[in-house]
Amino acid sequence: MFSEGDLQAIWLTLKLASVTTILLMLFAPPLAWWLARSQAKIRPLVESLVALPLILPPTVLGFYLLIAFSPNHFLGRWWLSFNEHSLAFSFSGLVIASVVYSLPFVVQPLQSAFVHLDKRYLEVSATLGYGKYERLYKIIFPMLLPSFIIAGALGFAHTIGEFGVVLMIGGNIPGETQVLSIQLFDHVESLQYSEAHQLSFMLLAFSVSWLVLIYGFLQKRQQRILNA
Amino acid sequence: MLKFDIQKSFTHKQTGQTSELHFKAQVNLSGVCAIFGDSGAGKTTLLRCLVGLEPCTGAIQFSNKTWLSTDSKQLLPTEKRRIGVVFQEPRLFPHLNVQQNLQLAVNKAGHTGFSIEQLADKLGFSELLSHQTTQLSGGQKQRVAIARALLTDPQLLVMDEPLSSLDQGSKQLLLPFIKAISQQIPILYITHSEQELFYLSRHMLLVNDGKIEASGEPQQLFLNSDLSLIKFAHQGLILNVSVKGYDQSEGLIKGCLELQTLYVSAESQPDSEQIQVKINSRDVIVALQPIVGSSLLNCLSVTVEEVHMDAQKAVILTLQLGEQYMYAYITLRSFNKLQLAVGSHVYAHVKTMSIVN
């Protein structure tokens, strides 16, 4: 049904979304916890920076990343000190860009869950003998598991739909940076409408079922727990 | 021995005023020590400071362990103090069922003197173990919360008005249970119910206006007119009565109160030679002569010791019988009609009274 190029693009997109989601799930929870609880003066600034990709045109983000990746700048120079190829137009570059681009989609559901988490549950956990960190992963994590899944799922889905940033920093290298949305764009440009239909419909079906899972099931489940 | 001397200051957000709490006391760790006082007096804050949930300064010493010492910069976190806490509301984890909630305590504490099954049986929720906590009633949840606190293998149990929102049935089940538990684990028990206070505790801390106003035996503190307790005491006092006999067929204890005879209803023969009864000051009828031909059982010959008028224009008479005192709450009109004064000799008829121990 799909051409070899399409399959390669699908595979690459899934790989990019998976790596990005794993990275985000490692450092977004502590960041979201800090944003939810901190009284620091710098917090609103950090919160704004995290939310920036929500409103910034992806091309702007991509443009600045492209500049940062160049050997004239710190990040690009540092990367080239132990790598042969530049970050621009590479899979690694795409991962970095996707992490920045999808960050708010992962942080915000977590932050919202942490804000609504009743502090009294933390107190009870302490009286049951659970230490500062132990209570987080033994009690709070299972309690907010639906929110963690929502955060991961949104980050994953959003990375799959990425276009503008990839176009700016990834270009169109099959197997390296040619992701689904770029492949689709190629099909349309070369007037291959039936191929474009196939890819578009697949992405549409995926997105709808993904969102139904998130809002129809996980979100409800989390609200039931938080409102108990 | 639990010894503490702690301070905490609050700044009210709206008024900007600061208020200072200062709690200092020593508590022997046996049985139930009640923390008694008006709402807003600082009882819950005191408890939260002792548990370590509220930051404060000063020193807390438990047995030979230091929980807090601001001077030597020592602070033992809550999770290391091994206190079982029952909050006013149950606070069960909503994502777990009853069994899993209890298991969470067991997992951390390891072996305890209690098992889940045993406690579920005693507290009557065996058939609820597989239920979600959201399906439970308030009383059921609080019973599970008490079991959870006991399963943490605590060296001290702390309870913040655990029965205040429960129905009478749950209270009647839990009060004897808590009293029995206190033989094994010392309990700090916040309450503003006199019934719970006298039933459970032999020792109390009176909290008033952010301070420990007094500590000691409840009966003694209630008789001390210098304490803020006097407004509770005016509602009724506790009297010591020696038991002379029990009539099974009538369900009546025949007692002796300062050489006068007193009959008290009781379901069974009392265990001890001494009982304590509480006579509500509104249940005392004052008469110049003994009332005859009525259903009243008890008539005590007393002397008016003190007369006190309250804000509602009612009169509180302090009545003396030998070494003990009781209060009678009468209307100003009755007071005037009977022409009472300090030193008057009258008859106090008691409608009902309750045994408190």
Image: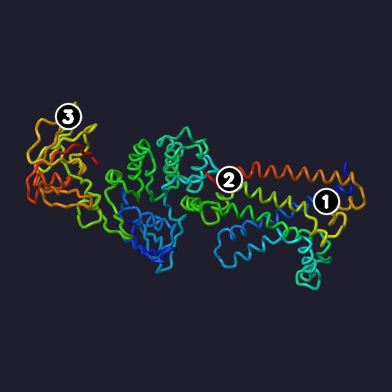
Q: Amino acid at mark 3?
A: Asp
**With respect to residue A62, does A113 lie above or below?**
above
Task: Name the spot of residue A99 as percent of width and height, x first.
Answer: 72, 58
Q: Chain of mark 2?
A: A
Which residue is painted at 44% across and 40% down in the image? B138
Relative horizontal placement of residue B232, taking residue B62 as reference (left or right): left
Q: Are marks 2 and 1 on the same chain?
A: yes
Q: Amino acid at mark 2?
A: Gln
Question: What secondary structure is marked by label 2?
Answer: helix
Please name the residue that numbered disc 1 is placed on.
A180
Task: Name the spot of residue B349 as percent of width and height, x first.
Answer: 14, 39
The answer to whether residue B83 shows anywhere in this view is yes
Please name the residue that numbered disc 3 is placed on.
B247
Question: What secondary structure is marked by label 1?
Answer: helix
Relative horizontal placement of residue A101, taking residue A169 as reference (left or right): left
Task: Name the spot of residue B2 as percent of width and height, x first.
Answer: 34, 57
